[in-house]
Amino acid sequence: MQASRSDVNIFMSTQSKKKRAPQFSLTNFLIVILVTIALFLIVDFGCRAATNYRINNESERLRDGVADLRARHEMLRKRLEYVQGDAYVEEIARTQLKWTRPGETVVVVVTPAGTPPDPATEVAPLPDRLSAPQSDWLPWWLLFFDTVPPTDVF
């Protein structure tokens, strides 16, 4: 039996394919392992760098917050010292409680009851900056000058 030329070619091609099967060498294996490790290290480094950036920003924000709180604490400490002092007690006693020291006389301006207000001396609404409770200066102004105070002075 004689083999045809095509049969021989088929037989040879199948044998050559078997012989040419890709061999996975040790160097190829090491290259794949090293590339995998390098990719892992690059990704891990990126994650750590992003975490470090977030931590540094948070640290800076907290430092600023601590500085603000220290400044507020100092202001409150000074306020506490002032409130615990005699000057504050006297200020509150004189302004809010209308107390006096022995020997002082309190003068209060009172308009007569039942007298209709004079339209010429009627007090116009004050601007916001004058309506703050500073003291009872407006009745005194009206008593001495009999006119509404100018707004450009205050």
Image: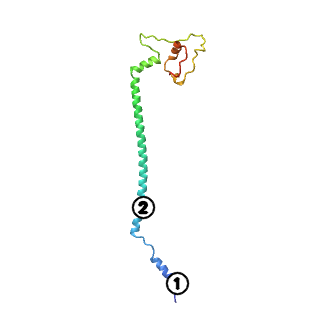
How many C-alpha atoms fall within 10 Å of the one at disc 1: few (<14), some, or many (≥20)? few
- Between 40 and 3, which is closer to the camera in this rendering? 40
Residue 128 shown left or right of residue 73 in the figure = right
**Amino acid beneath label 1:** Asp
Q: Residue tagged by mark 2?
A: 36
Examine the rendered structure and indicate whether residue 62 appears above or below residue 76.
below
How many C-alpha atoms fall within 10 Å of the one at disc 2: few (<14), some, or many (≥20)? few
Q: Earlier in the sequence, mark 1 or mark 2?
A: 1
Helix, strand or loop under label 2: helix
Q: Residue at x 43, y 59 (%)?
A: 39
Q: Residue tagged by mark 1?
A: 7
**Amino acid beneath label 2:** Thr
Examine the rendered structure and indicate whether residue 143 appears above or below residue 30.
above
Instruction: Give yes or no for contact between labels 1 and 2 (Cβ–Cβ under 8 Å).
Output: no
Q: Residue at x 40, y 70 (%)?
A: 25
Q: Residue at x 42, y 61 (%)?
A: 36
Which image quadrant for residue 127?
Answer: top right
Examine the rendered structure and indicate whether residue 140 appears above or below residue 79.
above
Q: Position of residue 67 (x, y in %)?
A: 40, 36
Q: Residue at x 41, y 48 (%)?
A: 52
Helix, strand or loop under label 1: helix
